[in-house]
Image: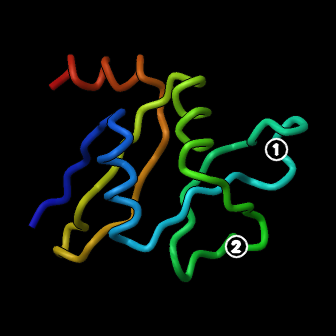
Amino acid sequence: MASSSKTTTDHNQIRKWAEARGGLPVTVRGTGDGDEPGVLRIDFPGGTGSDRFEEIAWDEWFEKFDENNLAFLYQDHKADGAESTFFKLISRETAKEKERGK
C-alpha cells in the first residue's frame, strides 16, 4: 500500500484527524510573545516532546493557524497500512502550488 498526503485548511477535518489519533493542540514553550501562542504543533500520546509543549485550546490553535495563513498537510496511513500521525504545517501558498503541480 502506498502512502499519500492530503492538504486541508478545514478546522473540523484537522481536529477530527488529530483527535482520532489522540492528538492535542499545543504550542512549543518559549516561542510565543506574551499571551500570543508560539509555534503550533499537535502532540500525540507517546510523543517525545511533551515537556517542551504547552496545551492550548483548539480555538486558540486555529486562530493562530488562520492568522499565519497555514495549511495542514497530513497522511492518513503509512505505506504499510498502519495509521499515521504524520503532519506538517505549510503556507497556504505552498499548498496551492502543490495542488497546481498535480
| Left or right: 30 in relation to 16 | right
| The one of 90 and 80 positioned closer to us in this rendering | 90
> Which label is found at residue 95?
none
Amino acid type for the residue under numbered disc 2: Ser
Location of residue 96 in the rendering, given as x and y in whole percent from the top left corner: 31, 19
| Left or right: 29 in relation to 60 | right
Amino acid type for the residue under numbered disc 1: Thr
Considering only order in the chain, which callout, 1 or 2, is on the residue closer to the N terminus?
Answer: 1
Q: Residue at image x 31%, y 36%?
A: 8
Q: CA distance from mark 2 to mark 1?
A: 15 Å
Q: Which residue is mark 2?
A: 50
Which quarter of the figure has residue 52?
A: bottom right
| The one of 6 and 36 positioned closer to us in this rendering | 36
Q: Against 3, is 6 above or below?
A: above
- Dot 2 lies on which element? loop
Local packing at callout 2 (Cα closer than 10 Å; few below 14, some 14-19, many 20+) is: some
Q: Residue at image x 26%, y 73%?
A: 83
| Image quarter hosting the N terminus | bottom left
Q: Residue furthest right?
A: 34
Q: Residue furthest left?
A: 1
Q: Against 64, is 84 above or below?
A: below
Local packing at callout 1 (Cα closer than 10 Å; few below 14, some 14-19, many 20+) is: few
Q: Residue at image x 69%, y 43%?
A: 39
Q: Against 36, is 75 above or below?
A: below
Location of residue 50 in the rendering, given as x and y in whole percent from the top left corner: 70, 73
Q: Which residue is mark 1?
A: 31
| Image quarter hosting the C terminus | top left
Q: Residue at image x 13%, y 60%?
A: 2
Which quarter of the figure has residue 71?
A: top left
The type of colouring in the image is rainbow
